Image (cartoon, coloured by chain):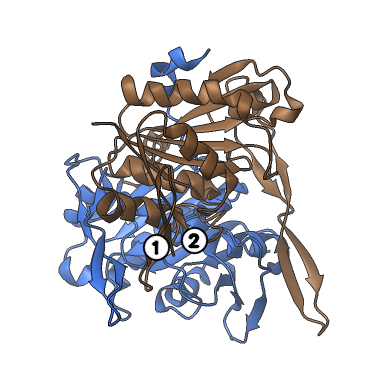
Chain colours: A brown, B blue
């Protein structure tokens, strides 16, 4: 039996990125897309509580698509439990339109979906392309994406690990150098809101901001992306910090 | 000048938990509450994109309250940048109504707020009480919460660390034994949706499920909570896994 590949994203089931990824994944197995009905960017690992979910099957030829009125993590849970014809062999998320490198992994619905699969003990990979253009070039990344998917299906990922794969803007990277397995660089978004005044004299705030990365390590995803590589960050869905546990022993009282 | 303490949560600014925490925090400094206008449980680290935010100042006597039309992480960003009279010395989140121990930290809006503060380089603590009752007992935990807040203000937390503090159901824990600094236990939610059929014959799905924890380590938050302790998990907002980076070196190509 062919491997079953469940695919979700956070840009919604109609986004070009998820359709590109689904077509690529069809070379590796049977594909079921379960993705948000509308854009769910920056939904992180959120779940829908207090409101039930609906799932609608969207007619298509090459693979199955369900559109779900929920978050990316909802989609993965519902896909695994109810919508897939059998348990998936691999869960993919993306291709996201925009970076999920560095600290963005925490806000990312794409990676929320991938990490949810990992929690449920399914191997998973999130793919993101740094360009926000719907018609962004992605073809030069295809051989590398194939290698990563092949690795996950045939060699297997480390247990409880999801891969956060980011691809540089390929129009600006004529010579894609390869892939780098690395850590997430430390960064923050500064000046993250723009304050405006509405026609009635009341303030409102638009999310905006500047990505500020002072982490110059050559072992980071930002370094890889800035130097013509695809970055691969192995992510474990666990914030526990063993060094800090030792440092805070005096609170054991 | 008194320390400034910014407080958020995910249950909304009217929840009993945040009002209890704010009253307690008034003993340590000047308090500004910036919290979601409505319940934002399970919003994780999500941000509001595509829709601007509004902030309304709620009249109160003992401390300042802003109600914001956004997520917990939005509230912390907006509080730090626009609503606080000066930069906070400490950011608190909670007291959440329900557990954020183990894997729940990933879904938690309470901890999304606390971790956002950490990313912005402010020390932060999220507090959660395992009871969902609005009038749940919390008084026996007060001396311990005071110790943790005092530690953060006077000794300082390790850099880039947020504390995830969970308090057992105190009605069922007549002898609170103390606090344990520990790691998050590994777990998952199984059977996470209940499928129903509406009056028109169409399926819908309610989020539900059973918390399933096979991690029996005595160094975990679940062990601490099951054995009469308050759990304190130091959380670093970084999923990068150094062991997996080594294991996956063959993908550097």
Q: Is residue B214 left or right of residue B7?
A: left
Whether residue B19 is visible, yes or no, is: yes
Q: Which of the 4 image quadrants contains residue B30?
A: bottom right
Name the mark nearer the viewer: 1 or 2.
1
Q: Which mark is residue A56?
A: 1
SS at mark 2? loop
Task: Locate residue A97, reporting x and y percent.
Answer: 62, 44
A27 versus B231 height, above or below: above
B52 versus A46 height, above or below: below
Labels 1 and 2 touching (C-beta < 8 A)? yes
Check the residue under mark 1 and report the chain it is in: A
Of pointers 1 and 2, the one earlier in the residue sequence: 2
Q: Which of the 4 image quadrants contains residue B184?
A: top left
Residue nearest the viewer, comparing B237 with A243: B237
Task: Locate residue B117, reporting x and y percent.
Answer: 57, 53
Q: Who's the residue at 27% across and 76% down the image?
A: B201
Q: Which of the 4 image quadrants contains residue A169?
A: top right
Q: Who's the residue at 73% across and 20% down the image?
A: A174
SS at mark 1? strand
Q: Which mark is residue A37?
A: 2
Residue nearest the viewer, comparing B181 with A33: A33
Q: Residues within 10 Å of mark 2 (few under 14, many from 20)?
A: many
Residue nearest the viewer, comparing B186 with B85: B186
Q: Who's the residue at 52% across and 46% down the image?
A: A106
Marks 1 and 2 sit apart, C-alpha to C-alpha, by 9 Å
């Amino acid at each position: 039996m062919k491997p079953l590949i469940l695919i979700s994203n956070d840009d919604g089931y109609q986004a070009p990125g998820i359709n590109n990824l689904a077509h690529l994944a069809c070379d590796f197995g049977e594909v079921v897309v379960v993705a948000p009905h509308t854009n769910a960017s920056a939904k992180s690992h959120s779940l829908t509580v207090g409101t039930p979910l609906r799932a609608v099957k969207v007619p298509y030829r090459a693979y199955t698509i369900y559109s779900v009125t929920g978050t990316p993590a909802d989609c993965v849970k519902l896909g695994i439990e109810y919508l897939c014809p059998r348990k998936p062999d691999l869960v993919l998320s993306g291709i996201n339109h925009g970076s999920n490198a560095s600290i963005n992994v925490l806000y990312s619905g794409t990676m929320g979906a991938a990490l949810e699969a990992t929690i449920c003990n399914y191997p998973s990979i999130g793919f993101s392309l740094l360009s926000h253009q719907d018609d962004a070039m992605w073809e030069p990344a295809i051989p590398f994406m194939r290698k990563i998917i092949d690795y996950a299906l045939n060699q297997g990922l480390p247990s409880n690990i999801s891969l956060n794969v980011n691809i540089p803007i390929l129009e600006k990277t004529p010579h894609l150098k390869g892939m780098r397995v690395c850590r997430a660089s430390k960064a923050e978004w500064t000046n993250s809101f723009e304050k405006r005044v509405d026609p009635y004299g009341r303030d409102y705030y638009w999310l905006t901001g500047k990505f500020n990365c002072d982490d110059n390590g050559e072992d980071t995803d930002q370094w890889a992306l800035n130097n013509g590589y695809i970055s691969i960050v192995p992510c474990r869905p666990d914030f526990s910090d063993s060094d800090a546990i030792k440092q805070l022993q005096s609170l054991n009282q």
